[in-house]
Every structure is written in structure tokens, then in C-alpha cells.
């Protein structure tokens, strides 16, 4: 896909992706997330993501929320372990309005004390909501164990205690220390010329004071394998298996993305779905995930089932893992897995807001964006030998930790 990048004097990059559609999508990606919080500030990055919508130097909360919604646009945001993202979808004539609003809420929010106090209540409700969903809570608890003692293990939302203790000074200090101009990308996909985007982007972002990144993230250490069971007030058992895995820059990253998609990724034809759900009728939800991060990654496998079926489900999963270790995919099987994965990626480009966000993150992580042909070449370059080694390293039950929530009764 065609794209252009223009770097402002302060390091902020403008990513331009031309499109002939009447709907445009834009985002501002900031390479700051929950892993960048201090020891006693769990949940701060996510808290800031909420607070930027509350009040700026010239707008009230209502004015912020209505600035785009009044013209039918959609404005939203999210926080991850490593990123904060604000994004919008809008009709083409409203690019200037959108980028001006991004500027206002990211760089001119005032974080009034009364709004901080109100938003704490909202996030405390959000934390409670997640705790009431064991299929969500178990992932957070598992990551806390896999990355024990490291900020990557923390729940992005924080805890009730940590959120209650956050202050206006915490908010301002985190932004000053982590919102680095050379780790920000303003990305737009729409029917505009590069010159138009540079003109509007420069108007709102060229005068932002330079705040360059100084490497300070610490990599997590590998943890000993654990097997933990916990009783909860739930009706089903829930289990997560997993381990620390490859980073964004590891040579096996593409191979594990491919193998994970074949084994337990999206689609009803994954190995786990066919064997555990369709053949044996044990689990309604069973899936595996691989999430590569800057300097590490995590592989997880989740299933939920009746308590009395949990051991059988686990036995069947280990059986399928053993098959992949002892009988690696043939060239034909691997090609089928590649065709499936490539097709899913190609279809994913239809989600244009997801596409522009992904491209912006790639620019931050790699200082480049691979086009689809390059992505497909990397997938097609994965060999059966590589897949066999990845399976040996990732699908060995002796290396996999587990966390299970069992019903009290």
C-alpha cells in the first residue's frame, strides 16, 4: 500500500496513506503504556487516556465529545502495555477538525482535580466489571505471574488501591517523562494529498516542544514454570497455559504468528477448534494467542469448560502439541496454513482504522512499514524446519505454565 512519511522538526511523524473513499481514519499513536508506569502508579497510562477527554484549556468535556460526534464522526481511544492510541473515523471534509482536536486533548488537557476524582469512580467500576468476567481476569492474573516483578505483568487498568492514589502531579509527570515527540505518529488514511496533510499537521504539531526519547525500559527476566489453581465463585473452569516468547524483532516472530494461527488462531478450522470443540464437544471457547512486544512476547492458550471436562481438554491439547513437535508440518500442510494466514491478513486491510493504527505502530517499532507483498514474502519464507523448531520451543508442556480458575463447588 502506498504511503508517505513526513517528519516534523520536533520528531513527530506524519503518516499519509492515500485513499479514494469518502470516509477517513486518523490516529495519534504514542509509544507509552502501562509498562512505563512507576512502582506505585499502576493504571496511570490508562487513567490519562480517560482524562484527556475531560477538559482542555479551551474546551469542556461536552465540547470535546461533541466536536466530532456533531458531524457524525467516531472518536475513541485505548491503552496497551506499550502504547496509547487516540483514533477517529470521519467524513473527508473534517480532517482539520480531527487533527486539531487530537492536538487539543493530547497537549492541552488540564486534568482538573474534580474530574480526576470523578474518573477514578468510573475506572473502579471498570476494574470491578473485569473481575466479574473470569475469562478476562484470568489473562491479567496469568500475565502478572509470567512477568512477575515487572511492569508488563500489571493489569492495564491498575488496582483499586493504585487508582485511588493517583494525583494530578502523577498525570503531568508521566506525560512529561513518556510522551516523546520522536515516538509519536499522527497517521491518516483518506482522500488527501501529502501536501495537504503536511500543511494541516504542521499547523497543529510543528510547534509542540521537542521531547526526545531516552531508552529506559527494562526487559523482563524469565520466570520459573508454575502450575496454579484457584477457586472462584464461578460456574465453569477456566485455564490459561503459556510462557514468555519471541519479541517483535525476533527472527521467529513471523513463524510463530503463522503457527499460532494454524493451531488456535481465528477461524473455525484451527487445530484446537476442530479437535477440542468440534470433535469432542468439550469447550465452547478455545484459542491461542501470540503477542510480540518490543523486547519480549507472550504465548497463551485459553479454554473454558465444565470442571469435570477440564482434565480431558488439557490432555487433548497436549496431545495436539505433541503431534506438532514430533510430526512437523509437511510442505503441503505448511502451504495451506500460509494461504489461510495470508488471506486473513489481506481481508484485514478492509478494517481501515485497524490498518492505519497497525501501520503507525510499525513505523514506531521498525522505522518502516512493509507493504503486503513484503509481508506475504516473509510468511512464505517460513520453512518446515523453522516451524519444527518453534513448535519444539513453544509447544513443550514441560515449559508451559498454567493458571486455572475452578468453581468453588
Image (tube, helix red, strand yellow):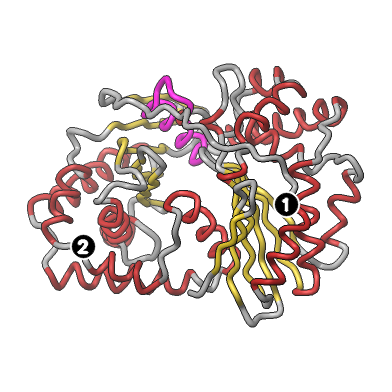
Magenta region, residue range? 134-151
Residue at mark 1: 205
In the image, 299: left or right of 39?
left
Name the residue located 33 percent from the left edge and 47 percent from the top edge: 249
Q: CA distance from mark 1 to mark 2?
A: 41 Å
Residue 280 makes an appearance in the image: no
Residue 34, image quadrant: top right
Name the residue located 51 percent from the left edge and 53 percent from the top edge: 361
Q: Nearer the viewer, residue 375 or 260?
A: 375
Look at the numbered disc 1 and give the secondary structure of its residue.
helix
Q: x, y percentage for residue 70?
A: 88, 63
Residue 30, image quadrant: top right
Look at the numbered disc 2 and give the secondary structure of its residue.
loop
Residue 386 makes an appearance in the image: yes
Name the residue located 28 percent from the left edge and 70 percent from the top edge: 377
Q: Nearer the viewer, residue 154 or 7?
A: 7
| Figure check: 55 above or below 233 | below
Whether 245 is among the magenta residues is no
Residue 123, image quadrant: top right
Name the residue located 36 percent from the left edge and 47 percent from the top edge: 248
Residue extending furthest toward the front = 9
Count up the numbered dots: 2
Determine the main secondary structure of the stretch shown in magenta: helix
Q: Nearer the viewer, residue 312 or 259?
A: 259
On residue 382, the disc is 2
Name the image quarter holding the C terminus.
top left
Front disc: 1 or 2:
1
N-terminal of the two: label 1 or label 2? 1
In the image, 47: left or right of 249?
right
Q: x, y percentage for residue 350?
A: 54, 73
Q: x, y percentage for residue 53?
A: 79, 44
Determine crowd level at label 1: few under 14, some 14-19, many 20+ residues with C-alpha closer than 10 A. Answer: many
Amino acid at each position: 500500500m502506498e504511503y508517505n512519511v513526513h517528519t516534523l522538526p520536533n520528531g513527530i511523524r506524519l503518516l499519509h496513506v492515500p485513499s479514494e473513499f469518502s470516509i477517513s481514519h486518523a490516529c495519534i499513536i504514542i509509544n507509552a503504556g502501562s509498562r512505563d508506569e512507576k512502582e506505585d502508579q499502576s493504571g496511570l497510562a490508562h487513567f490519562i487516556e480517560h482524562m484527556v477527554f475531560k477538559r482542555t484549556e479551551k474546551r469542556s468535556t461536552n465540547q470535546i465529545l461533541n466536536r466530532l460526534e456533531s458531524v457524525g464522526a467516531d472518536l475513541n481511544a485505548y491503552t496497551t502495555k506499550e502504547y496509547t492510541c487516540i483514533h477517529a473515523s470521519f467524513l473527508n471534509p473534517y480532517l482539520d477538525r480531527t487533527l486539531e482536536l487530537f492536538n487539543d486533548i493530547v497537549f492541552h488537557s488540564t486534568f482538573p482535580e474534580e474530574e480526576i476524582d470523578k474518573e477514578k469512580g468510573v475506572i473502579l467500576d471498570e476494574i470491578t466489571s473485569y473481575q466479574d468476567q473470569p475469562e478476562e481476569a484470568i489473562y491479567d492474573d496469568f500475565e502478572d505471574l509470567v512477568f512477575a516483578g515487572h511492569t508488563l505483568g500489571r493489569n492495564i487498568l491498575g488496582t483499586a488501591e493504585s487508582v485511588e492514589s493517583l494525583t494530578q502531579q502523577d498525570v503531568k509527570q508521566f506525560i512529561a517523562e513518556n510522551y516523546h515527540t520522536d515516538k509519536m505518529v499522527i497517521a491518516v488514511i483518506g482522500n488527501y494529498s501529502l501536501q495537504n496533510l503536511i500543511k494541516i499537521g504542521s499547523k497543529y504539531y510543528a510547534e509542540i516542544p521537542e521531547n526526545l526519547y531516552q531508552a529506559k525500559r527494562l526487559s523482563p527476566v524469565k520466570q520459573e514454570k508454575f502450575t496454579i489453581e484457584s477457586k472462584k465463585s464461578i460456574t465453569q473452569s477456566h485455564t490459561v497455559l503459556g510462557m514468555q516468547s519471541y519479541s517483535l524483532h525476533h527472527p521467529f516472530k513471523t513463524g510463530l504468528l503463522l503457527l499460532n494461527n494454524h493451531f488456535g488462531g481465528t477461524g473455525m478450522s484451527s487445530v484446537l477448534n476442530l479437535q477440542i470443540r468440534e470433535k469432542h464437544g468439550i469447550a465452547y471457547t478455545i484459542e491461542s494467542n501470540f503477542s510480540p512486544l518490543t523486547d519480549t512476547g507472550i504465548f497463551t492458550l485459553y479454554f473454558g469448560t465444565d470442571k469435570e471436562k477440564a482434565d480431558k481438554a488439557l490432555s487433548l491439547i497436549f496431545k495436539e502439541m505433541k503431534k506438532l513437535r514430533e510430526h512437523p508440518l509437511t510442505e503441503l500442510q505448511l502451504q495451506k496454513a500460509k494461504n489461510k494466514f495470508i488471506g486473513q491478513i489481506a481481508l484485514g486491510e478492509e478494517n481501515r482504522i485497524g490498518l492505519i493504527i497497525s501501520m503507525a505502530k510499525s513505523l514506531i517499532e521498525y522505522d518502516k512499514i512493509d507493504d503486503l507483498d513484503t509481508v506475504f514474502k516473509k510468511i512464505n519464507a517460513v520453512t518446515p524446519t523453522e516451524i519444527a523448531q518453534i513448535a519444539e520451543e513453544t509447544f513443550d508442556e514441560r515449559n508451559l505454565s498454567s493458571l486455572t480458575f475452578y468453581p468453588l463447588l
